[in-house]
Amino acid sequence: MSKTLPVVAIVGRPNVGKSALFNRILGRRQAVVADRPGVTRDRIVAQAEWSGRDFLLIDTGGMDPYDTDELRQDVFRQAQIAMEEADVICLICDGQEGIHPLDEEVAARLRQSDKPILLVVNKAESPTVEMERYSFYALGLDEPIAISALHGTNTGDFLDKVLSLMPPEDDSEEDAEEIAVALVGRPNVGKSSLLNRLSGTQRSLVHDKAGTTRDTVDSLIVEDGQAFRILDTAGMRRRAKIDDEVEYYSSLRAASSLERAQVGVLVIDAMDGVTSQCKRVAGMITEAGLAVMVLVNKWDLIGTSQDTVARREKFVQELSADLDFMAYAPVIFLSAKTGEGCEEILPTVEAVFEQWNRRIATPLLNEVIHEAVALRPPPSYKGRVLKVLYCSQRRNQPPTFLLKVNSTDLIHFSYERYLENQLRQAFGFVGTPIQLKFGRSS
């Protein structure tokens, strides 16, 4: 967690409207919501703001300590971790159903905490529920506040109360500038295991069943003074193969996480290699214009030490062929399970981010471009020859260059690719796309 932002955790039994309240506070549908219990599994973290105060908001799965299902036990543990991290804990109850035995169980656990607890009676869409909120005094917590996350009723008063329970603001520290990193790939390639390995704790649920992660899970990791915002996403499958409403919206959330990211990390299962869906996800990263790297996970399952080198060389060749449009991406072979190779991930993220942000001086650019044109002059077309007159960098993130030419009609994609390769040969640009724009010289 960020060292300067207070943390607010939303907890409670299943299906009381925790994710609806989470989305209401954020003003967007970040958590997947459906009218059935057990949709939220991981704890989801997002930065929120109220009355000029920023804080981290955590949505959790429904707490049921008596459920013997292994996956739902993990959900319960995730909620407990959120409560341990929180500065303020909000217990959400269903005002229409009244006090449930699980409410009493969760409240009993919270009464043992020395942290501020805010009791929230949700689904107060009618005056009757507003009056019934007093019955929740029986939970032994402070005065309950009635709200409707669905309609936004009293949520402003609720947030005012949350702010009053937060620790005082500390302006002596500044947040480290974050690098937003999206872990993307198809289901069950080990994205959540990688997040847990990087963070040193169980941030995301890990299970053999594909599709365990349903929401994008945010985690902040600080290493050597650099902050990394890691977005663990749900596995992305082709829409034709998605037949579940929750999985459909989870896939949309995963795709939208690329809009929030600066670095896209494509995770591939070493046992399966590059699949058609891996290519599709790689294409999405490229279209988003992000810095990129490729992680080949589960490498511990590939052969013995004697043939691993040969297998790795073959795998790299297959990657180059299958993902030729992002051949500039660095590749790391690793195992989230054993930790082998994982120490390379964050330094490589930082390196490709720097390349994505890189700017090149105009005189140096023109020197490289003019030399490239001299070494390989453009081919003629109907007696006309392309002339590259001037080059300048228009922006970074990703590096984008404008080349002034005598006619844009004379540009052939093969020569554009040649110029791009010459720029990469001269300046590196490892892990970042570069874009060439052509304009007619006036």
Image: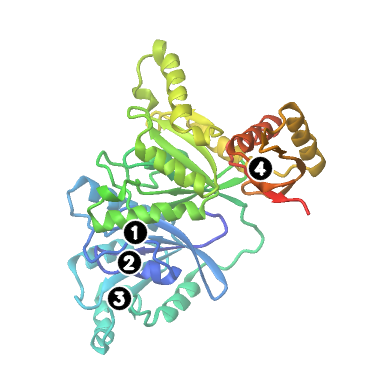
Q: Are marks 3 and 2 in contact (CB under 8 Å)?
A: no
SS for callout 3: strand
The picture places residue 239, in percent across and down from the top left corner, at 30, 51
Q: Residue at x 46, y 27 (%)?
A: 321
Amino acid of disc 2: Lys
Q: Residue at the front extreme?
A: 382
State the separation of the CA atoms marked 1 and 4: 57 Å
What is the quadrant of residue 390 in the picture?
Answer: top right
The front one of 336 and 64 is: 336
Q: Which of these two is toward me, 276 or 266?
A: 276
Label 3 – label 1 distance at C-alpha: 16 Å
Circle 4 residue: 410
Instruction: Determine the CA span between mark 4 and mark 3.
Output: 65 Å
Q: Nearer the viewer, mark 1 or mark 4?
A: 4
Q: Distance between the Cα atoms at labels 4 and 2?
A: 59 Å
Q: Residue at x 31, y 70 (%)?
A: 92
**Location of mark 2 (residue):** 18
